[in-house]
Image (cartoon, grey):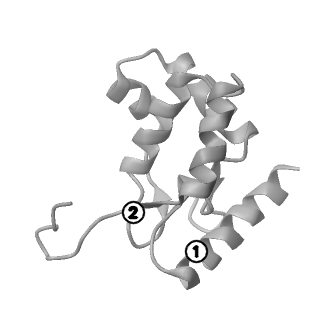
Amino acid sequence: MKPREDGDENFVMVHQRDLDSTIALLGERRLELRDAAVFLVLMNYVNWRSGRAHVTTKYIAERLQVKLPVAVSAITRLRKENLVRRVVDRRTGETYFLINPFLASVGGPRRRGHLWQQFEDSLEEET
């Protein structure tokens, strides 16, 4: 892990227990291997302070050198399995992704609690 220029370390913690269940989704074919690649790109763009991934599906497709519908389908499957959520901030109109904080998160327990609340709110907004 390389420190950033300002000395801070930019990292995302992956929680093994939930990672194991996510790997099982791949084995059960509920997720495809390409979905894991999309998930890795999302994790790469998670802001270490906010826990938000400010990246578009179009950019993910470009980064992986796949067609946009491939990335859209992967995001759809990840959302269906409650691994990620696309969120639109009602105040600013800003769009970002949240990763399920039980699978991958930033910060300590308090930050994870805040991220879980945001993630849970996004689940309720979808229904």
**Residue at position x 43%, y 40% in the image:** 40
Disc 2 residue type (three-letter): Asn
Task: Report x, y in % for residue 38.
Answer: 48, 33
Of the residues under marks 2 and 1, which one precedes in the sequence? 2
Reading the image, the residue beneath label 1 is 112
Q: In the picture shown, does residue 50 fall above or below 59?
A: below
Q: CA distance from mark 2 to mark 1?
A: 13 Å
Disc tally is: 2
Q: Residues within 10 Å of mark 1 (few under 14, many from 20)?
A: some
Disc 1 residue type (three-letter): Arg
Q: In the picture shown, does residue 54 fall above or below 48?
A: above
Front residue of 127/74: it is 74
**Residue at position x 59%, y 27% in the image:** 74
Reading the image, the residue beneath label 2 is 47
**Residue at position x 73%, y 58% in the image:** 122
Q: In the picture shown, does residue 66 fall above or below 63?
A: above
Tell me: 12 left or right of 99.
left
Q: In the picture shown, does residue 40 fall above or below 53?
A: above
Residue 44's disc is: none
